[in-house]
Image (spheres, grey):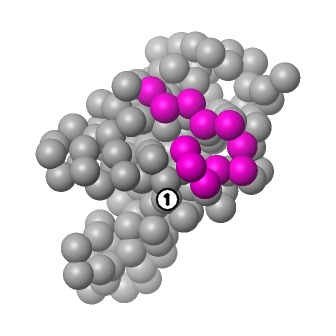
Amino acid sequence: MISTVLVPMEDSEMSERALEHALEAYPDAEITVLHVVGEPSPMMGQAMSLVLEDGLEHAAEAHAEDVFERAREIAAEHDAEVSTRFALGSPAKAIVNTAKDFDVVVVGSHGGTLAERLVVGNVAEKVFRRSPVPVTVVR
């Protein structure tokens, strides 16, 4: 029986679909939304804009709150609640490391823009291949 579900989310329609799927498929499970703020890199990860902030972790948590607010709205539409977590670093690594504490991961197949499809699609593939628990990829 599935009792805990991890749903990685960023600001994309695909991740919203993943959350909706999790809420519908596992109505009795505890669902946790994870938002990973990418580490600063030459590819300009999300955290690059946060590097100049005082308190990187606090700034990242504030950045994640927009995603969490949307997740709560979606959950409320399904008469449910979600827990939230955020992490800093490589999205695929953070998701896989967090997955060990859950029964299943439900992830969107990719983001909306071409860049998101290339990067986030790559994240979904890495999670699918490396996760210690089953993964459902939602399109």
Q: Is residue 58 visible?
A: no
Give 60 or 122, whichever is nearer the viewer. 122
Q: Position of residue 66 (x, y in %)?
A: 36, 47
Q: Is residue 8 visible?
A: yes
User: Label 1: few (<14), some or many (≥20) within 10 Å?
Assistant: many
Magenta stretch bounds: 128-138
Q: Determine which residue is flagged by label 1.
A: 92
Left or right: 97 in relation to 70? right
Q: Is 135 part of what is drawn in magenta?
A: yes
Left or right: 6 in relation to 9? right
Which residue, as the protein is rendered here, is positioned at the far left? 114
Q: Quadrant of the C terminus?
A: top left
**Vertical position of residue 97 compared to residue 107: above or below:** below
Give 95 or 75, whichever is nearer the viewer. 95
**Vertical position of residue 121 compared to residue 81: above or below:** below
**Point 56% across, 49% down: residue:** 129
**Point 27% across, 86% down: residue:** 52
**Point 42% across, 53% down: residue:** 123
Left or right: 49 in relation to 34? left
Q: Position of residue 62 (x, y in %)?
A: 40, 61
**Point 39% across, 30% down: residue:** 16
Q: Position of residue 124 (x, y in %)?
A: 44, 46
Q: Secondary structure at mark 1?
A: helix
Amino acid under disc 1: Ala
Q: Is 27 part of what is drawn in magenta?
A: no
